[in-house]
Amino acid sequence: MTKPDQSMRFLGFAFASADLLFEVDPKGIITFAIGAAKKVTGVGNVTLDNNSWRVLFAPSDHGVFSALINSLEGAARKGPIRCRLRDVSGMPPRYANLFACCLPQLAPHISCALSLTGDLDLVAGEHGLMDRTGFERAIIPLLAHAQASGLNVELALIEVASLANAVKTLSTDAADAVIDSLAGVLRAESISGAAARLASGQFAVVREKPVGKDTLAQRLKQSAKTVGIALEPRAAIVPLEGLTEPTQGLRALRFTLDHFLNDGLPKGADLTSVFHRRLNATMREAQAFTETVKARQFKLVFQPIVNLTTLEVHHYEALTRFAGKGSPADTIHMAEELEIIEEFDLAVAEKAIETLRHHGSAVRIAVNVSGRSFLRPKFLDRLLALTDGDVRLKDRLLFEITESAALVNLELAEERIQRLRRAGFEVCIDDFGAGAASLSYLRNLTVDVVKIDGQYVHQIDLNGRDGAVVRHLAALCHELGVRTIGEMVETQAEADKLKSLGVEMGQGFLFGAPMDQIPAVSVRSSARRTGTVDSWG
Ligand code: C2E
Ligand code: MG
Ligand code: MG
């Protein structure tokens, strides 16, 4: 075999990573193109040479390419940048990853490589920018990728204070052109398209730390100027390196975005130090929580749930109290966010089981379990191991699934719920009606009880919207054979209304606040004999 020519070798490498290679001059004219032009453009016999690069990309993404060309300095390479290719009629939108560099020997010409991609992992919305939810969702895989590939990543927060006012005076098309131009710069700056519009004048982008001076704000200003508008963007940088745990990164990002959206960019203050202070505090809190749980430094209090007609106590809900603190809600919320809730839920179940073993069979307890724990791989085995096949616990333990929004896999959730029910325990969905997904829970999950969220119950107006919601929920549950509890019942009037709307049981200060001990006689009605066991059903 003859020795290959060096340039052929480079061509081989280039094609190994791209479908189309092309070069553009400073005016944006393609001066050279080689590769699968037809595949990329969707048009046969197309000549790219001497055409503008615009023939390659969808108009919405022209801003990205312009911004890319303008941001290349030295021999730096940019990419991958996800771009939408020019639409081909009858075909769904197509995307490609774009890399570009400006070699000193070829300057001012720019060398570009395009490779077609499948579906977008990162879902972008209007102007090719993500919304906050999509941005947050993208961050964990992005940080993992950055860590694996040794990239030094940072979060840039951009505020364009005058944007809303400036675009108000423009036609829709002109306003879109302004946002497209800013979006183009941000997407070209981002890693894998992780650029978001958080509010009308607030943007965020995850990018690689620039080598020299940061010119992002300047470039945004410049690109707005090219579409005829004067803006004063300001940017602040938050380093993301060192966030080895992806959940830490997510937590930190959420905090930073909240702070940015509520207060804007700090005037002169250093956002980086604010961010780090908060991150360290969060990590300390998480550590303290894990230790508290390990040492079982919390107690359970018990609140009765009564039958609204007979006023008999049906069961007690176990609620956690940490020493010296009131409601555990904030702590639990933090533990859920940081995904350290599983050990806690098991510790609570363990304490509740101990309590049950100390009481007669008339006492039944409901234990809260976060939806986040519920789907963890080993959780259910560990929970069932705590009950250890003890027949005395059967029909006396109920699991209330809180944070049901975390039940992202309903099929798996249903399988686990049925395992619990087969083992002799009942399952309840807590805070029902609070999330948009409530109806799909009822369709997909076979549960025994639903607890209607306190916000629909407290100060309920029979003829208002909440009244209608509760009436229909109660009727639907009744038809499906699911029992209902209304929570946060504080007055007799509320209890009466709930009953008239068809709700079976109630919980709230009217019937009793959470208490340290379960009374020896667990039923209110004098007609009942102590120790009577009545079934859940
Ligand atoms: P939840 O499970 O919906 O519990 C009901 C909350 O409402 C309790 O707050 C209770 O004290 C309060 N409450 C009861 N009756 C009334 C009333 O008439 N009026 C008003 N305004 N409030 C009433 P708490 O104990 O602060 O718990 C808050 C949340 O924290 C719970 O909501 C639950 O989501 C979570 N939580 C509490 N203990 C645990 C636990 O051991 N494990 C888990 N995973 N979550 C828990
Ligand atoms: Mg509950
Ligand atoms: Mg609740």
Image: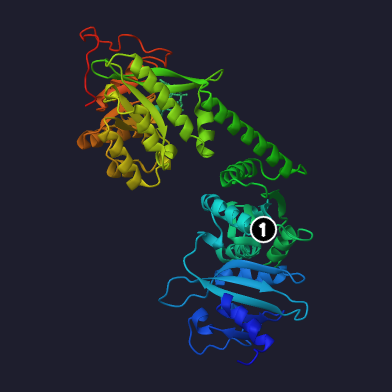
Q: Nearer the viewer, residue 291 or 522?
A: 291
> CB of residue at label 1: within 8 Å of ligand 1?
no
The quarter of the rendered structure image containing the C terminus is top left
Q: Is residue 359 toward the left or the right of residue 81 in the image?
A: left
* For residue 221, above or below residue 27: above
Give residue 52's position: percent from left, percent from top.
62, 82
Label 1 Cα neighbours within 10 Å, binned few <14 / some 14-19 / many ≥20: some
Residue ID at (49%, 81%): 39
Q: Nearer the viewer, residue 98 or 436?
A: 98
Q: Nearer the viewer, residue 110 or 351?
A: 351
Instruction: Indicate the quadrant where residue 443 lies.
Output: top left
Task: Specify the farthest residue to the bottom.
Answer: 2
The quarter of the rendered structure image containing the N terminus is bottom right
Q: Quadrant of ligand 2?
A: top left
Amino acid found under the numbered disc labelled 1: Leu
Give residue 232's position: percent from left, percent from top.
73, 56
Residue ID at (73%, 60%): 210
Q: SS at mark 1?
A: loop
Give residue 505's position: percent from left, percent from top.
28, 23
Residue marked by disc 1: 151
* For residue 27, above or below residue 386: below
Give residue 321's position: percent from left, percent from top.
49, 20
* For residue 492, above or below residue 177: above
Instruction: Indicate the quadrant where residue 451 lies.
Output: top left
* For residue 148, above or below residue 371: below
Q: Residue 452: tell me if it is visible.
A: no
Task: Specify the farthest residue to the top.
Answer: 526
Q: Nearer the viewer, residue 194 or 171?
A: 194
Q: Is residue 175 toward the left or the right of residue 445 in the image?
A: right
